[in-house]
């Protein structure tokens, strides 16, 4: 009942011209019901009315564009993210797995972004991975050290050793001349 009551209050706020209040209520609803994409759609509409097309595109991203306004906003959102899937994931702030979405279009969009991440060998948010084994493998692969990491570590150790050695050598040479 809280969801329906809040939606009625949002509609009242919108009819009364209080777009900022309606926006804030919708953010709360999206946080409480992360798998309900209709809430994101409504919030995108509110941001469009407020004059924030990038934010509107952020919340319309998982919708199939029905109007030119939605298509423009989604393009603006993607441009603001430099078409980087990791930035898109961070900005859309999914709080549930895509398999819980009712919309096949939304699931396809997320799968498309995951495929781009895999192709570019970019980190995929763990909560998006369905298979626990895949998530564990991904974590292990991500945390293992590479040859480059070891090379950097050895280089830093040699640099520190060199600084200490030449400092000690300089001080000992100075003291030897001083006390001669």
Image: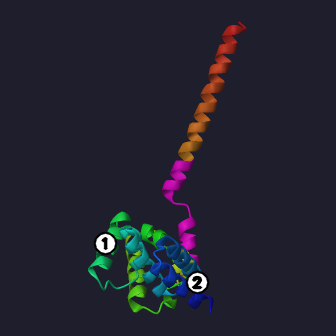
Q: Nearer the viewer, mark 1 or mark 2?
A: 1
Span colored in magenta? 136-153
12, 47: nearer the viewer: 12
Q: Mark 2 — residue?
A: 132
Looking at the rendered image, the quarter that the N terminus falls into is bottom right
155, 133: nearer the viewer: 133
Q: Earlier in the sequence, mark 1 or mark 2?
A: 1
Residue 8 visible at all:
yes
Q: Indicate the position of residue 58 as horizontal and vertical percent values.
A: 41, 73
Between the residue at mark 1 and the residue at mark 2, the CA separation in whole angstroms equals 33 Å
Would residue 104 appear left or right of 140 to someone viewing this image?
A: left
Q: Indicate the position of residue 65 as horizontal and vertical percent values.
A: 32, 83
Does 137 lie within the magenta span?
Answer: yes
Q: Report the residue that reaches farthest toward the right.
A: 179
Does 162 lie within the magenta span?
Answer: no
Magenta stretch secondary structure, dominant = helix
SS of the residue under disc 1: helix
């Amino acid at each position: 009942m809280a969801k329906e009551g809040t939606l009625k209050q949002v509609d009242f706020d919108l009819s009364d011209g209080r777009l900022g209040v309606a926006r804030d209520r919708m953010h709360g609803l999206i946080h409480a019901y992360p798998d309900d994409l209709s809430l994101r759609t409504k919030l995108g509409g509110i941001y469009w009315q407020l004059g924030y097309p990038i934010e509107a595109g952020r919340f319309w991203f998982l919708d199939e564009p029905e109007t030119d306004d939605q298509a423009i906003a989604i393009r603006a959102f993607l441009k603001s993210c430099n078409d980087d899937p990791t930035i898109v994931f961070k900005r859309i702030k999914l709080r549930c797995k895509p398999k819980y979405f009712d919309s096949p279009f939304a699931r396809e969009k997320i799968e498309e972004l995951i495929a781009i991440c895999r192709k570019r060998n970019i980190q995929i948010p763990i909560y998006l991975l369905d298979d626990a084994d895949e998530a564990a493998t991904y974590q292990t692969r991500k945390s293992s050290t590479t040859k480059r990491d070891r090379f950097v570590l050895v280089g830093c150790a040699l640099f520190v050793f060199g600084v200490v050695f030449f400092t000690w050598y300089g001080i000992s040479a100075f003291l030897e001349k001083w006390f001669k």
